[in-house]
Amino acid sequence: MHNKRKKRKNKALRPLVGALLAFCVPLASLAGCSDSADDEPPEAGNPPGADDSLFIFDMSAFLDTLPSYSASYDYLKLATALQGLANREKPRIYFMFESTRENRAYGTKIDAYWLEKLSADGKLFGSLTKNSEKYPPTLNGFHALMEDFSRYFEGFVVWDEDVPATSNLASTAAGAYDLLPVRYSGEPGSLYRSLFSPEGANHKTSEIKLDFTGKFNSAAGNIWDTAIPSTGSAKCDAYLWAKEKLLDANLTNPLRMAYCTDAWIGGAGTGSRQAPLFETTLANADFHIAQKSFFFDLSVDDSIAPIDDRGQRIGEDVRTLRELLLSQAKRSGFNIFSLSGFVPWNYKYTSVADPESHMEPVIAEWTSIAIFSAYGAQSEADANAGIGDVSNLSALCHETLDAELRQSNDRGASNALEYDKDTKYLMIYMGDYDAASWSSSILPMFWDDPRRGEMPLCWPVCSGLSKRIPHLYNYIYETAGPGDYFVAGNNGTGYIVSTMFEPEQRPEGMEDLMPAWEKLNIEYNRRFDLDILGFHINLDSRTLCVDYIPTRVMESFAKIWPKGAVVMKGLSAVGFGNAEYAKNPETGELTPCIGHWDIYRNYASSPEEYGQAIYDLVSFPGLRNRQFHMVRTIMASPSLICDSVAHMREAYPDLKFEVVDPYTMMRLVMESG
C-alpha cells in the first residue's frame, strides 16, 4: 500500500523560535509544515516500493570514493541520521559498512550475515524486497537516496567544527526535530557546499533549521539563548544549552542517553585526532537518533582539564555530566535508564591518550560506571576501540523478540558428578558481550564455531540490550544446544552497580533505585529464563573496585538470581577461598556466591598458551585452596577453549579438575558446605 502519511508538524521546534531570530531561515519554516490537513508529502519523498522494500546501500564502497577523511566523516554522520529517521517506524534503509575492527580483520561480513539470517521466512526482512541496485555507491547515488527519503526529515542542523561538542548537539537535535546533521565548511567538495551552495547537488531539501556555528564561544556572560551563566568552556556550555532546550524540554527519550564520541576524534577542534571511521561511533547513531537519545561526550576525570578542552576549569566536564544525569534521572521517574557508550579511553581522557592524565583506562571505566550507576544509568558499554561500533540497529531492532526464550539444557539435572574435596571445578564464562556492538557484530563469529556444544560453556546475556539487538538473542536461543548455558551477563540486565544505590553513595537529589533495579532484573530474568548471575563488578564512589558488598545488595542477589552469582570483588573469600552465601530476606533461602578470575590472554592465542594461562590460574599460590573457579574469557572461541582444556589434561595429568556447567557448579558449592 502506498504510504500517504501526512508531513509531520514539528511542534518541537517552537521553543527555539526566539533563538532562531539570529538565523537566516524564515521563522515561518520552523513549524516544518502548515497546519492544513491536506498538506501532502512531496512526490520525491517516498521512493516506489518503500513500504515493502529494504533499500541496501554499500556505505563502505561509497566512503572509499570520497576525496578526504573529513568528507567521509561528514557523509557517514549525515547518512546514519537519515537511516535512523527513515527506519524509526520500520526497516527501510540498510547499510553495508562492517563496523568493527574484528569483522574487518577476519573478513566477517556481519552486515551481510544479518541481512541473510533475517531474510528467512518469518523473520524481519523475510517479506521485504531487497533492493541493492537503486542507489549505487556514488555521490549521485547517495544524494538520490537522501532525496528519495526526504519525507523523513525536516531540514538540516549545522554544527561548528571549532566546538566539536556541537556535533553531538546536532545528533540530539536530529532525533528531537527530525533533522540531518552537517558540519559547516566552505571547502570545495564538502558536504555543506554540496547541499547549500548554488552549484550544490541537492536543492529540494536544503533548508537549515538550526545552526550552532559561532554560538558557543566560552565568552563571559550567559550561554547562548539561555539565562545560564557560561562555564567558561564552550564544550560544557553546549551541553548545558542542550540540557535546557532539549533534555529538560522533554524532547529527548527519558530512558536513553548515548555516550558517543564527538567530532574531536573526527579531526575537528584544537589538537584533534582522526580515528578510523569504524571507531568513531558514527555507525551507532542511527538507532539513537531513531530513539531520540541524548548524545554527550564528557570526561569522568575531575583531576585535570581534558585533552579536548584544556582551557576549561578543572572538573567542569564532570560537573556538567552530573547535571545531565540528574536531569535524565528525574525525567525517567527515577527508574533505570539505558546509557549506551563508553569512555573513549584510547583517544581521550586516560593515560593512554593524554600525557597529562594519570587515569588508567580500567580506572576510567570504573569511575564512569560508578558515576552513571548513582543516577540509574545502566551502561551498554559500546567501547570505541574497534569493537564499539555497530551498523543498522535502527533496522535490526524491529525484529520481534521471540515469545518463548528458554534454555535448551537441563540445568545440570543429568550431571551426577559427586563433590570431591580434592577436585578443582571450572566454569567457563564466554565474556563479555555487555554491549550491543560486540554482541551483534562479534559474538556470531564465535557462536557459530562448529565445536560449540562439546563442552559446557556459559554465555552471558545482558537482557537489557534486547531492545537494540533482539535479532541476536533470538538467534542464539533458537540455535542453542544442551551444552550451551545462558547466564545473566555483566551485572544483570546491564552494566550498573547497585552498591551505588546505597544512601551513603547516593548523590543529592536522587531517590533509592534498588526497588526499580530489582524489579527490572526479575522481569527480564523471567523473560530470558535466567537464574544465575554470571559476572558482577562491584564498585563504590570512594574506592572503586571494593572488597565489601553491603548486606542489602547481597540480599538482592538472592532475590534476583536464586541459583547463584559470580562476583568480581566484595566477598571476603574471593581470590583465596571458595564461596559465601547471600540470604533471601523473604524466604530465608541461600544463594551461593563465588569469585572469578580473568584469563589475560588474547583470544588469538594458541591452545597451549591459553591452556597454560588457565593452569597458572588454578595453581596460583594464593588460590591453591580454592576449588571453585569461574574462568572469565574475552572473545574466545569454543574451539580454543576445548583445545586449551585438552592441552591442560595432557600437559598436567596430575591436576584433578572438571569443567562443569553453572548449575552443577553451584550445586557442588552448596554440597561443599
Image (cartoon, helix red, strand yellow):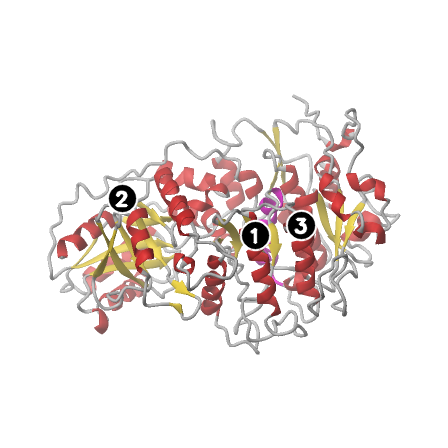
Q: Please, what is the three-letter code of the amino acid marked with disc 2?
A: Gly
Residue lying at the far top of the rendered structure: 1
Please rate how many residues cluster around mark 2, counting C-alpha atoms within 10 Å: few if below 14, some from 14 to 19, many from 20.
some
Please rate how many residues cluster around mark 3, counting C-alpha atoms within 10 Å: few if below 14, some from 14 to 19, many from 20.
many
- Please, what secondary structure does the residue beneath circle 2 have? loop
Q: Are marks 1 and 3 in contact (CB under 8 Å)?
A: no
Residue at numbered disc 1: 328
Q: Nearer the viewer, residue 409 or 214?
A: 214
> Residue 378 placed where, x, y %?
47, 53
Residue sitting at x 66%, y 27%? 49
Q: Nearer the viewer, residue 13 or 7?
A: 13
Membership of 277 in magenta stretch: yes
Q: Please, what is the three-letter code of the amino acid marked with disc 3?
A: Leu
Membership of 496 in magenta stretch: no
Front tag of 1 and 2? 1
Q: Nearer the viewer, residue 441 or 152?
A: 152
Q: On the picture, is 584 further left or further right than 340?
A: left
Q: Main secondary structure of the magenta part?
A: helix
- Dot placed on the residue nearer the N-terminal end, 1 or 3: 3
- Dot placed on the residue nearer the N-terminal end, 1 or 2: 1
Answer whether residue 516 is visible to the viewer in this image: yes
- Please, what secondary structure does the residue beneath circle 3 have? helix
Residue at numbered disc 2: 483
Please rate how many residues cluster around mark 1, counting C-alpha atoms within 10 Å: few if below 14, some from 14 to 19, many from 20.
many
> Residue 640 placed where, x, y %?
32, 55
Q: Rounded to the nearest whole Å, what is the CA distance between mark 1 and mark 3?
A: 11 Å
Front tag of 3 and 2? 3
Residue at numbered disc 3: 246
Span of residues in magenta: 275-290
Quick check: 659 above or below 202? below
Q: Which quarter of the figure is the N terminus placed in?
A: top right
- Dot placed on the residue nearer the N-terminal end, 3 or 2: 3
